[in-house]
Amino acid sequence: MTNLVPTREHTELASSVRSLLDRRSDSQAVRTAMSSSDGFDRELWATLCDQVGAAALAIPEEHGGAGFTLAETYVVLEELGRALTPSPLLASVISSAALSEGALLERIASGVVATLAWSGITGPADAPVDVTFQDGTLTGTVSPVLNGDTAEILLVVAKHGDGVGLFCVDPSESGLSRMRIGGLDPTFGFASIELDAVPAEPITLDATELLNATHRVGALAVTALQVGCAQRGLDMTVDYTKQREQFGRPIGSFQALKHRMADMLVRTQMSRAGAWAAVQAHVHGSPDFDRMAAAASSYCSEAALAVAAETAQLHGGIAITWEHDAHLVLKRAQALNQLFGQPHQQRQSLIL
C-alpha cells in the first residue's frame, strides 16, 4: 500500500539525522567542510554511514546493504539538503542505482565513496558520451563529475562499437587524471576526469536501459535535496522577519511579506508532496513512476529556485554577503537545477 505521507519510522529517521546535523553540520562546519581538500567532512560521513547507514539504506541485504528502499534514502537526503551539508551521498546513491550486484555494492554500502562519470549527470539521459571503450581501455574526458576527485569507486559510461556500456576503473591507474573544478555552489564537489587508454572492467556493454533508470533515480534523489534546500530558505526567512524591525515593528508582521512567505510555504509543501509521491511510486514499482519522477523534478527545481530567490530578497542586503548563509541557499538551488535534466527537459519527457 502506498504511504501518502511519511510513516512514524520515517519521521524518527529524519529526527535522528537532523539532530546529528544540528550538532555536526552547523553553518561554520559547512564552511569548513566545503573548503577542505575533500570538499566534505569525512568524519561526519563516517558517522552517517556507521550510525544511520546512509549509504546502505537502499542496497539489498544480500549485497551488504540495509535492505530498505529509496524512501529512507530520500529522508536522509532531505535533511542533508536542509542543512546544506556537503556530502558524497548523492554520488553514492547514483552509483549504487547503476549496479545490480557484486562486491562494488558492498563497498558502497560500507561507506566507500563512489561516483558515476557520465554526461547524463548534468543533462538528459541521452546526453552525448565523450568516452570511448576500445581494446579493454577507456579514452576521453568527462566533466563535471560529482565527487570525482575523491571517489574510491569510479564508474564510467563509455561508447563502443555496439552501443553504450558501463565500466569500472581503478582510480589509481596510470593514464587517469582527476582535477577538482570550481562550481557555483561551493558545497558541491565536482571534478574533471581525463582518461588516456586506462584499463577498465566492463560491468555491462548494454547500459542504455540501466542509465535511463539511473537517471530517474538521480532526478528523484535531487528533489530531496531541493525540498530540504527550500525548507532551509523558508525557515531562515521566517526567523529573520521575526527579528528584523522597521517602523518600530517586526517586518514579518507586514501583510505583503506574510503573503510572500505563505507562497514560499506552499511551494515547499507542494514540492515535498510531489517528491514523496514519486518516491512511493518507485518503492511500489508503479508503472507511472517515470512520469511522476519527471513531474516532481520539474516542479521541485523551479520551486527551490523561487524560494531561494525570495530568501535572498527578504533578507535584504545581508543575503549577498559571504558571512550569511542565504547566498548558499541560492547557489545550492541553482546548482541542483542543473542536475539530471533541467525543468523544461523534464516537462518535455512528459509529452513524448
Image (cartoon, rainbow, N blue to C red):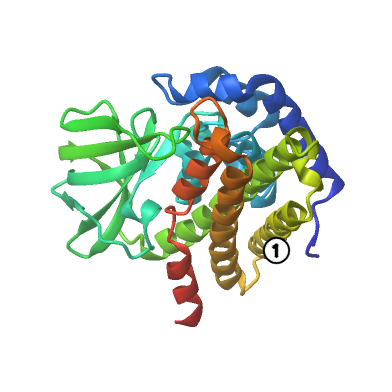
Q: Nearer the viewer, residue 237 or 160?
A: 237
Q: Which residue extends farthest right?
A: 8
Q: Is residue 216 left or right of residue 237?
A: left
Residue 19 higher or lower than 286, as above or below = above
Position in image of residue 344 (x %, y %)? 45, 69
**Image quarter for residue 38?**
top left
Position in image of residue 217 (x %, y %)? 53, 56
Could you tell me if residue 41 is visible in this image?
Answer: no
Residue 176 higher or lower than 337, as above or below = above
Q: Is residue 313 left or right of residue 188?
A: right
For the point 71% across and 36% down, the residue is 240
Q: Nearer the viewer, residue 234 or 186?
A: 234
Q: Is residue 334 left or right of residue 228?
A: left
How many labels, in total?
A: 1
For the point 65% across and 20% down, the residue is 24
Q: Which residue extends farthest front?
A: 247
Q: Nearer the viewer, residue 76 or 310?
A: 310
Q: Quadrant of the N terminus?
A: bottom right
For the point 71% across and 32% down, the residue is 17
Position in image of residue 112 (x %, y %)? 48, 28
Position in image of residue 155 (x %, y %)? 35, 43
| Amino acid type, label 1 | Ala
Q: Is residue 257 left or right of residue 179?
A: right
Mark 1 crowdedness (10 Å alpha carbons): few <14, some 14-19, many ≥20 = many
Q: Which residue is mark 1?
A: 277
Q: Which residue extends farthest bottom?
A: 351
For the point 44% across and 56% down, the residue is 340
Residue 7 higher or lower than 36, as above or below = below
**Element marked by disc 1:** helix
